Image (cartoon, grey):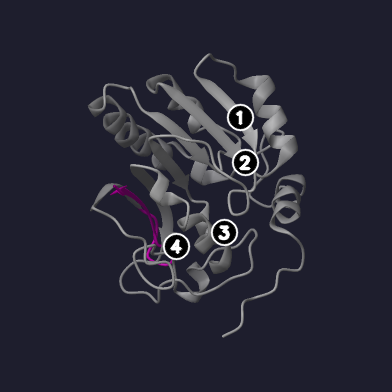
């Protein structure tokens, strides 16, 4: 099967999502959706991640790929040795730089599929891959072996589903096709030393669940 062609580059698609408020409208100039703001979803996620950070004496250097409006990252970075927050939308990164400042915090505008990624101990990918095409996910997966830990959050269907159906990068995800991203399966085949579930939040039967995995990579 040939790869799905994008109507425009992912960077432009993501910029349009924020400009047109396709993930929702709020008092915020940039809004990364309910998944980054609903306390029922965010609070248990934050608690699970902070527990992992605390287990490592809050001494990890963390790279947050797809940091969005930083409502979530803002509740995490204080418990790290260093926190590198990355997003593809330049205006969003500039806004984050103005709002959030700390000695252990930095922001960069990068295309995580194409650009080189910073050195770190742990990668956070929170509901990012689900918006990307399989080709872009494969480009990202090739880089993950450079890190010790991956904290991956994906929105997937309840019950059995057909993993990794290809999509065009953008606002939507694979849920409506009864699919979701599973990095351990083809065509990604991520090699891990250890895997566990850090957190799971069930929505409705039709809306699926949001699952956070911890992968130890090397």
**Residue 49 shows in the view:** yes
SS for tag 1?
strand
Q: Residue at x 44, y 62 (%)?
A: 207
Reading the image, the residue beneath label 4 is: 207
Reading the image, the residue beneath label 3 is: 131
Reading the image, the residue beneath label 2 is: 87
State the image coordinates of residue 203 (x, y, percent, origin top left): 39, 55
Marks 1 and 4, Cα distance to the nearest angstrom?
32 Å
Marks 4 and 3, Cα distance to the nearest angstrom?
16 Å
Q: Residue at x 33, y 42 (%)?
A: 148
Marks 4 and 2, Cα distance to the nearest angstrom?
26 Å
SS for tag 4?
loop
State the image coordinates of residue 62 (x, y, percent, origin top left): 43, 32
Q: Residue at x 39, y 43 (%)?
A: 147
Question: Does label 1 or label 4 sit earlier along the sequence?
Answer: 1
On the image, which quarter does residue 67 sit in? top right
Reading the image, the residue beneath label 1 is: 107
Magenta range: 202-218
Q: Is residue 63 left or right of residue 193?
A: right
Q: Nearer the viewer, residue 3 or 22?
A: 3
């Amino acid at each position: 099967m040939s790869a799905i062609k994008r109507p425009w580059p992912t960077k432009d698609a993501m910029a349009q999502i924020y400009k047109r408020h396709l993930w929702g409208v709020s008092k915020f100039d940039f809004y990364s959706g309910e998944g980054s703001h609903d306390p029922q979803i965010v609070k248990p996620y934050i608690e699970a991640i902070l527990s992992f950070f605390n287990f490592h004496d809050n001494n990890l250097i963390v790279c947050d790929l797809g940091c969005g409006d930083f409502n979530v990252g803002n509740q995490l970075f204080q418990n790290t040795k260093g926190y590198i927050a990355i997003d593809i939308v330049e205006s969003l990164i500039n806004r984050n730089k103005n709002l959030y400042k700390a000695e252990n915090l930095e922001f960069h505008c990068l295309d995580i599929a194409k650009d080189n990624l910073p050195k770190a101990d742990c990668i956070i990918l929170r509901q990012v891959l689900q918006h990307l095409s399989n080709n872009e996910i494969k480009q990202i997966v090739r880089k993950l072996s450079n890190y010790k830990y991956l904290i991956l959050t994906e929105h997937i269907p309840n019950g059995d589903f057909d993993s990794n159906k290809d999509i065009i990068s953008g606002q939507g995800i694979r849920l409506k096709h009864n699919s979701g991203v599973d990095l351990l399966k083809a065509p990604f085949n991520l090699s891990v030393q250890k895997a566990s579930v850090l957190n799971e939040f069930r929505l409705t039967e039709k809306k699926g669940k949001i699952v956070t995995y911890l992968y130890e990579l090397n």
